Image (spheres, helix red, strand yellow):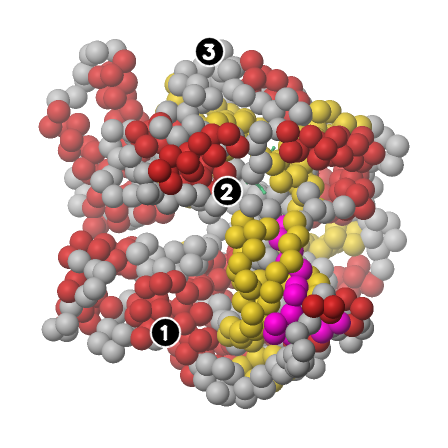
Amino acid sequence: MTSDIPVEKLNVDEARAELADLARRLAEADDAYHRKDAPVLSDADYDALKRRNAEIEARFPDLKRADSPSEKVGAEPAEGFSKVRHARRMLSLENAFDGEEIADFDARIRRYLGLTEDAGLLYTAEPKIDGLSLSLRYEGGDLVQAATRGDGEVGENVTANARTIADIPERLTGAPDILEVRGEVYMAHADFEALNARQSDAGAKTFANPRNAAAGSLRQLDPSITAARPLRFFAYGWGVLSAPLADTQMGAIERLAALGFQTNPLTKLCNGPEEMLAHYAGIEQRRATLGYDIDGVVYKVDDLSLQDRLGFRSTTPRWALAHKFPAELAWTRLERIEIQVGRTGALSPVARLTPVTVGGVVVSNATLHNEDYIAGRDAKGSEIRGGKDIREGDWVQVYRAGDVIPKVADVDLSKRPEGAQPYAFPATCPECGSEAIREEGDAVRRCTGGLICPAQAVERLKHFVSRGAFDIEGLGAKQVEMFYRDEVLPIREPADIFTLAERDAQSVSKLKNRDGWGEKSATNLFAAIEARRTIPLDRLIFALGIRHVGESAADLLARNYLTWDAFESAMTNAQVDDGPEWENLISIDGVGKVMAESLVTAFHQTAERNSIDRLVAHLTVEPAQPRGQVDSPVAGKTVVFTGTLEKMTRAEAKARAEALGAKVAGSVSKKTDLVVAGPGAGSKAKKAQDLGVETIDEDAWLALIGA
Ligand code: IVH
């Protein structure tokens, strides 16, 4: 029945192929059993296939399919929600706050597409619903899966809960065979008030706002609780489709409405920024009477073929923009200023406030940015807030925009208490006592304690286990704090995580006997750590927590160096501002000098370097895939564009090349494989000639990529 190879002997390709085969066979068996009433497998054989599937998935968690048989409803795991890998990533939106940014958005799109200012270009404009996004998968018209956004790549399987939402149809007629509908789950104001009243009558916890209530209700392990809480759903987009819904965004939304989804009635087609802003103003005016929370207006290019050409940046589409409503304000007392020490040693001042409600959310902490900000200056020394400084005891204005951390925006000097003193920003680290210095050109004062500073070490560990990094289930910020202080089973650096189970086994004071832990949670934690011994290169690079290296930079580096060995040896051999490894590093489009210097420094500081080496000794690092299609004629090649392109804009040419797996560099070096030179090409073409790098014109390039 199942393959003969023991699971522990399978290689990745065999595992992937077998998971595909198992998904198909189990789906056929389900179909035969549930819909045709004609089973094709005995119960024992069916169970054996399911077990085999689960064992392979446990060993290769990253190969788990979006349509994994273990995700099918009825097979919910007992604890928590199972994970779902989205077949198409769920992205977020770039934000804008004023009319000028909308004009820039339109201009950028025209530039990218090579359209003139007066060429017609339609956008849809619709309310941005303040809820949480959900992806619904329909196969043959049946709802088969509902998943939350999660980190955009992997979300939670909330199918049973989604089935209880009246706005979500169970069955569609006339839909494409495979259809993923995306939209927002939200709670209406009236339902939110009623829910909170019921909760408080029952002595249960109440929710701060409708969005938290919607999230808390959708993520209930018991679907009957979700069913008792009135959630709603607006459809505004789609993921995988077996056939297009329409040629335009508006057409696709109308099609979704015809299929039975709620779509927002304030969705409107606009011709250019002026009409978009007029519709924005109209929606803002009606905001208070809509009966549900919205936090802005979303604009999308209407023509879907143009959306395709525009494509995506790392986490946001180029063809859409969220125009947020202005932030909300309130005044309160600043009780005291505290200093928090971050992962990179930055000393960040935090305002502890007398709690105040700002736009429906209770705020008791806000950021004060840095010492200049407190003193009433910007980074260049010019006055801000008319030069007013901020002191403990002051009456301050708190500002909150959407999800961002609230900040102290202004101060009312007429209410300053007598005797209030200017705030003296510490020159030593409040956590470890090391000197805190401010480098030239840096707005931030930093602790020089490095890894000896407990605050930096803990923050680095928190970063290490965070979502985009190692994302170890059961090991969050709270547990990291606990293990860091633990005398018997300490975790002081990332490598310690991977020796935890072994140390626990040898210890008499076992984790399972500690407060807050038990046999099951300890076993689960060890299993979750085990599962992460194999880690994709980009996650590892991000997890190292090197200053200036965020998630998308880590991805960029991984796709350039492909393996840990190549990356590690390049960083080890690179010298700041000198030599081919350095040149190669900064020729990566998206890697600037500041980031490159930070990377090279991290690999040359003994303590930090040793800590990295100790960690990597415990890991199997999965190589990265080069960007885009691997079998294209330009895959893996380093390409430089120079001069004027006539058939497409520079930005589009670059995005296309990257989608085909090429690396696009900004300057010509020995590593360049190909230079595409248009009219007016200057020094770069000359350098290519000197170095003997192949140079072609735009038409030859288009022929090469088959455009
Ligand atoms: S489109 C690829 N349209 O806003 C673009 N998003 O800040 C996908 N949201 O994650 C999003 N209303 O949860 C879109 N009308 C709307 C929306 C909307 C709310 C949410 C969505 C997204 C977040 C980004």
User: Which residue bears the numbered disc 3?
Assistant: 173
Left or right, 133 with respect to 534, comes to: right
Which mark sits nearer the N-terminus, 2 or 3?
3
Whether the residue under disc 1 has CB within 8 Å of ligand 1: no
Report the quarter where the N terminus lies: top left
Q: Where residue 209 is drawn, which disc sits there?
A: 2
Q: Nearer the viewer, mark 2 or mark 1?
A: 2
- Determine whether 55 is above or below 385 in the image: above
Q: Where residue 307 is drawn, which disc sits there?
A: none
* Residue 41 percent across, percent down from the top left: 16, 21
Q: Residues within 10 Å of mark 2 (few under 14, many from 20)?
A: some
**For the residue marked with disc 2, what is the amino acid?**
Asn
| Label 1 SS | loop
Q: Nearer the viewer, mark 2 or mark 3?
A: 2
| Label 3 SS | loop
- Determine whether 198 is above or below 628 in the image: above
Which mark sits nearer the N-terminus, 3 or 1?
3
The residue lying at 30 percent from left, 48 percent from top is: 60
Q: Are marks 3 and 1 in contact (CB under 8 Å)?
A: no
Q: Quadrant of residue 409?
A: bottom right
Magenta region, residue range: 388-401
User: Which residue bears the numbered disc 1?
Assistant: 493
Report the quarter where the C terminus lies: top right
**Residue 405 can be seen in this image:** yes
**For the residue marked with disc 1, what is the amino acid?**
Glu
